[in-house]
Image: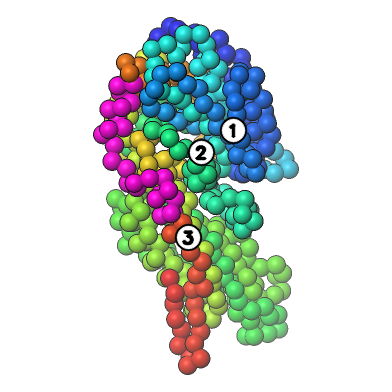
């Protein structure tokens, strides 16, 4: 690795590692990351950055310019934690914990910010860099986020799409971030991409009655929900293996009293898939099955759908440059690249719809991602090495008149003509369906 760049990062190792521990100890879930926001804002301002805050939600961005015209590179650090109440180090009041390593991402981004301020680091580079501390990557607490949307605070339920809709990424040409993984320290990997997501809220409505004395007078919303889930399970063999369709509901409400027929049952779920075509096609089948569960019991069901994440594809040309950066910073045998598409999801998928983007991983954690045994066990790898690779990638993209960045941009064909067009497409996916109508003539209409 370029010694100047390496020293620029290592000079700030204490800042980076202290940030990783502070954020770990103060976990907050999406659109609630106010403590993390305040801590990082102070650190960026101490480094001399002007911070542009989202204001009514956590998160901000800041720019650093080389003074020479060229592309703008957008780099992310995610702020939010997960809810894993069984984790030994979770917040005991909320159950929140950084069981996906976003604390390490944010610390690495802070280290990158500090290194970019070092004398000589921007020499010979063209263009600019936008550093973005972004909220709410994890698609959890859907009811809370819908409340924020209903109040007009947000438009979308995930952070990057929300920032996109606010214009915070206008003028950006390439985006990337490095996620923490449970691989060995020093290992760097990059796959082919990951699934997109439709977020679902499903509310079955029945009729309460005495569960022992007069169950015949009730309509069991819990049974209707179970029937709907089983109907979707019967569809699974119709899903194409290549499209990685996933449906994995949880029940957040299923009755309030053991001696009363449940009159309400609420499910949250994702539908995941490798393309928008697959997502929209299979989601209709799933809605039909969920509605059928309600009809079988004489219940009603309201289905709310919204776009969670777009399907993600790592940009091939950008990935090649990242491969060079990774090999400069860690032994070649520790660098792994595949074309495999993962069944998980990230809102970096939204970014790849409008600009060349990548989402690689660096080792330094242990345990299962999203699990109760997840820890950052090697913060030097997870944070300091991550910052070094990011700084090296920026150098490779923006040196020599930003030739590599310009080549990548020129070779990219976006799925949507503009950010505005993509934002409107996301909105078109959103719908609220009263999925079962009982007609006066005794027939039933299924709406899906």
Name above or below for residue 235 compared with residue 274: below
Q: Do the residues labelled 1 and 2 touch (CB within 8 Å)?
A: yes
**Which residue is disc 3 drawn over?**
430
Q: Is residue 87 magenta?
A: no
Q: Main secondary structure of the magenta part?
A: helix
Q: Residue 307 at what x, y percent from top left?
A: 46, 54
Residue at 50 percent of width and 46 percent of height: 165
Residue lying at the far right in this picture: please name it: 93
Name above or below for residue 448 compared with residue 347: below
Instruction: Quadrant for the C terminus, please.
Output: bottom left
Query: Pointer 2: residues within 10 angstroms few (<14), some, or many (20+)?
Result: some
Q: What stretch is highlighted in magenta?
A: 402-426
**Which residue is disc 1 drawn over?**
52
Residue lying at the far bottom in this picture: please name it: 441
Answer left or right for 242 relative to 390. Answer: left
Name above or below for residue 323 compared with residue 143: above
Q: Which type of secondary structure does the marked residue at label 2 adopt?
A: loop
Q: Does the magenta stretch include residue 411?
A: yes
Query: In the rendered structure, which disc, 1 or 2, sits on the residue that comes first in sequence?
Result: 1
Instruction: Quadrant for the N terminus, please.
Output: top left
């Amino acid at each position: 690795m370029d010694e100047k760049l390496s020293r620029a990062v290592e000079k700030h190792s204490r800042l980076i590692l202290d940030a990783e521990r502070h954020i770990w100890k103060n976990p907050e879930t999406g659109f609630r990351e106010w403590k993390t926001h305040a801590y990082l804002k102070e650190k960026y301002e101490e480094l001399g950055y002007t911070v542009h805050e989202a204001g009514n939600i956590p998160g901000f961005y800041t720019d650093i310019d080389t003074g020479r015209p060229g592309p703008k590179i957008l780099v992310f650090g995610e702020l939010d934690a997960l809810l894993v109440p069984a984790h030994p180090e979770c917040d005991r009041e909320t159950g929140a914990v950084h069981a996906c390593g976003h604390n390490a991402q944010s610390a690495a981004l802070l280290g990158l910010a500090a290194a970019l301020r070092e004398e000589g680091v921007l020499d010979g580079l063209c263009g600019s860099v936008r550093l973005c501390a972004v909220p709410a990557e994890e698609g959890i607490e859907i009811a809370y986020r819908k409340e924020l949307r209903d109040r007009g605070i947000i438009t979308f339920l995930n952070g990057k799409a929300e920032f996109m809709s606010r214009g915070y990424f206008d003028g950006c040409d390439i985006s990337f971030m490095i996620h923490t993984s449970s691989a060995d320290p020093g290992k760097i990997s990059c796959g082919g991409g990951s699934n997109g997501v439709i977020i679902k809220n499903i509310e079955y409505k029945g009729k309460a009655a005495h569960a022992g004395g007069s169950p015949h007078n009730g309509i069991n919303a819990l049974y209707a929900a179970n029937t709907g889930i089983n109907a979707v399970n019967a569809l699974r063999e119709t899903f194409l293996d290549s499209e990685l369709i996933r449906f994995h509901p949880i029940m957040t409400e299923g009755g309030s009293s053991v001696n009363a027929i449940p009159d309400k049952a609420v499910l949250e779920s994702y539908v995941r898939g490798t393309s928008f075509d697959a997502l929209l096609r299979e989601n209709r089948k799933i809605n039909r099955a969920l509605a059928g569960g309600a009809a079988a019991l004489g219940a009603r069901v309201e289905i709310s759908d919204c776009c969670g994440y777009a399907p993600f594809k790592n940009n091939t040309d950008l990935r090649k440059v990242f491969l060079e950066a990774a090999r400069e910073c860690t032994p070649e045998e520790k660098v792994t690249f595949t074309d495999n598409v993962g069944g998980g999801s990230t809102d970096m998928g939204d970014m790849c719809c409008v600009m060349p983007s990548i989402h690689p991983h660096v080792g330094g954690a242990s345990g299962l991602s999203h699990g109760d045994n997840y820890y950052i066990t090697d913060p030097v790898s997870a944070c300091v090495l991550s910052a070094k690779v990011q700084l090296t990638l920026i150098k490779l993209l923006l040196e020599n008149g930003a030739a590599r960045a310009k080549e990548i941009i020129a070779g990219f064909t976006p799925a949507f003509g503009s950010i505005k067009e993509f934002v409107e497409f996301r909105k078109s996916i959103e719908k609220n369906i009263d999925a079962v109508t009982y007609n006066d003539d005794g027939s039933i209409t299924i709406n899906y």
